[in-house]
Image (tube, rainbow, N blue to C red):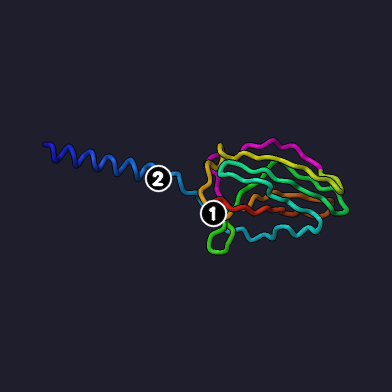
Amino acid sequence: MKKQRKLLLALTGICILLLGGCGQGQKLGEAFAEEVNTLEGAALRVDQASPTGISFTIQNQTDKDLSYGQDYHLQKQKDGTWYVLEPENPVAVTLEMLWLPVGGEEAMTVEWKDSYGELPKGNYRFVKNFSDEESGYYLAGEFTLE
């Protein structure tokens, strides 16, 4: 009887450890084939990054005003390829349109713990969509979590 109880406790412990690991890995989506940072004079600079958020600065040294929204997505690099990181929960942002005028600079902070959880170690990109009067562009800032 004692052997069966010990075996049951050991199996329960193993199951708890295995289940505890679930949700720790991030789900990678499609490979991201679009070009980033192609708009000369515009930049997204990562100032500080943590497993749960980022502080960044966007700069517009182009000759046109840029528009953008609160939306963003994260990408993770694996084997030299960037993949869209699937959020654990929907990313909730407001649908307002923001403007960055010629010569403008804007510092922002984003917390993603509720959507992406706590990111494990790895190489990541924070990606936002911008547009001018003619085209749309992706600006991305890379960061590493160790």
- Residue found at x 84% / y 45%: 104
Read off the residue under disc 1: 122
Whether the residues at callouts 1 and 2 have beta carbons within 8 Å, the answer is no
Q: Residues within 10 Å of mark 2 (few under 14, many from 20)?
A: few
- Residue found at x 29% / y 44%: 14
Occupied quadrant, residue 108: top right
Give the CA separation, mark 1 to mark 2.
17 Å
Q: Which stretch is magenta?
A: 85-99
In magenta segment, residue 57: no
Q: Residues within 10 Å of mark 1 (few under 14, many from 20)?
A: few
Main secondary-structure element of the magenta-colored stretch: loop
Amino acid type assigned to the residue bearing label 2 in the image: Gly
Q: Position of residue 124 (x, y in %)?
A: 59, 53
Mark found first going from the N terminus, 1 or 2? 2
**For residue 8, above or below residue 126:** above
Occupied quadrant, residue 30: bottom right
Query: For the residue labelled by badge 2, is the local secondary structure a helix, a strand or a loop?
Result: helix
